Every structure is written in structure tokens, then in C-alpha cells.
Amino acid sequence: MAAKNKFGFLSSNWLKIIAMAAMVIDHASVIFLGPETNIWRHIGRIAFPIFAFMIAEGAVHTKNKFLYASRLLAFSVISEVPFDMAFNGTYLEFSHQNVFFTLFLGLVSVYCLDSFRKKGLGILGLITTLACSFGALFLSIDYGFMGVIVITLMYMFSTVKTGVRYLGFAIAGLMTSIVYAFPLSFGFIPSQVYAALCVIPLSLYNGKRGRKMNKYFFYAFYPVHIIILYFIKMFIA
């Protein structure tokens, strides 16, 4: 659980909205301009580490861990067709899966790590995290191996003292720059260094949820905004 920040004024809902805005900018850039690096893609880099942090926070605050994980998995499946239509030009293929699968495996990693740690079996928690990470790599999901690691790190750093916590968030954001292209090799995407800027909104987090909103809005936003962008492109093409 993130420590309370007396200087913070952003609730978790506002962090999600900031991440969603950055995500829309990034996805619109890819769909309309192509995947090449540009200023709009730089802006989008903060989205994933913020979502990773919110998964870590959700793991602490949710009352029903099984239901939380089930929702993430359900929307992973729901989002796959819109994701493939927009980014792969087909209704369904398996060379690259959407980021909801990353969030789901990251949550499983966090749950297992915490559960085993409380039982004095930390090594089993580490093994589970590595298993989830390599599962993400094997399944070719968005952010792959490092995506799960970043979510786990966000959870770990969210419990430590303020100064170290924010440094950890910046490091975790930077780690999203490591994108695995092959099982035994990886490449560096320069635009990902901007992911470290996630530390700015995260340092303003006040530890509160904020005004009550329908939680399914945040889940549905991902597949809905992708399909809207896709049809806009089809309309203007």
C-alpha cells in the first residue's frame, strides 16, 4: 500500500484518467501515423507504468482477490479481437496479445509473491514471479517478460519510504524500455526512457480512491477506445 502523501492531490481515479489519456494518444499515433517513434509516442510511455502501479494498489485494496483477477482475465479475452483488428489487421491472431494479459499475470505474480512471503516461503514467490514473467514472454503479450517484472516492482516499492519509493517507480518505469524480441535477446526502444516520467504523477498520488466511479468504465475503456480509433481510421481511409 502506498504511503500517504501530504503533498499529493491526485486520487487513484485521476491517475487512471491520466494513464488512459496517454494511452489514447499513443494508440492514435500508432493507428493513424504508424509505429515509428514520435512525440505522441513519447507521451504514451507513461501509461503502462501508471497502470502497473494501479494494479499493485488494487492488489492491496481489493476485497475479493479472485474476482479482481477474474475481471482482468475476462477483459483480456474481450479486448483481444479489437486489439488484433486495430494493430494486426485481422480479427484474431496470436503473435502479439493485448496488455490486459500483462496486467493479469502481473497481479497473479503479486498475489503469489505476497502469499508465499507471509508463509516464509519467499523463494517460491520469486519462482512464481519468474514463471509469470516467462509465461508473458512465451505468450507474446504486450511488454512481455518485463511487464510482469515492472508490476511486481511497483508493488514492492509502494511499501517503502517515500524517497526510495519514487526512485523505485522511476526505475520501474525505465525498465519498460526493455522489450524482448527473442527468447534469448532483447532490444532497447529509445522512446521508452520517457516512461520514467511516470514518477511525476505518482509522486502526487494522495493514496485515496477519489470520487466513486463505475469500476467497469476503466476496464471497458481499453477495448472501446481501440475499436473507436479503428473505425475512425476505416472511415477516413
Image (cartoon, rainbow, N blue to C red):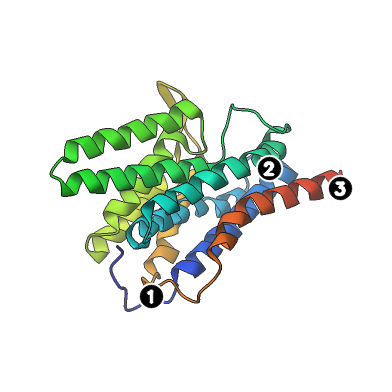
Tell whether label 3 touches label 2 (CB within 8 Å).
no
* Circle 2: element type: helix
Label 3 sits on what residue type? Phe
Callout 3 crowding tier (Cα within 10 Å): few <14, some 14–19, many ≥20: few
Q: Which residue is mark 2?
A: 82
Point out residue 135 in the picture as x, y percentages from the top left corner: 41, 30
Point out residue 170 in the picture as x, y percentages from the top left corner: 37, 54
Q: Nearer the viewer, mark 1 or mark 2?
A: 2
Find the residue positioned furthest to the right: 236
Name above or below for residue 2 compared with residue 32. Answer: below
In the image, what residue occupies the spot 80% across and 50% down?
Answer: 232
Q: Which residue is mark 3?
A: 235
Q: Nearer the viewer, mark 2 or mark 3?
A: 2
Nearest to N terminus: mark 3 or mark 1: 1
Give the alpha-carbon distance from disc 2 to disc 3, as whole Å.
16 Å
Callout 1 crowding tier (Cα within 10 Å): few <14, some 14–19, many ≥20: some
Closer to the camera in the image, 98 or 237:
98
Nearest to N terminus: mark 2 or mark 3: 2
Question: Is residue 35 visible to the viewer in this orientation of the structure?
Answer: no
Taking 206 as reference, is 115 left or right? Answer: left
Taking 160 as reference, is 73 left or right? Answer: right
Point out residue 115 in the picture as x, y percentages from the top left corner: 24, 47
User: In what quadrant of the picture does the N terminus appear?
Assistant: bottom left
Name above or below for residue 79 compared with residue 133. Answer: below
Tell whether label 1 touches label 3 (CB within 8 Å).
no
Point out residue 89 in the picture as x, y percentages from the top left corner: 73, 33
Label 1 sits on what residue type? Gly
Taking 236 as reference, is 16 left or right? Answer: left
Closer to the camera in the image, 150 or 163:
150
Q: Which residue is mark 1?
A: 8
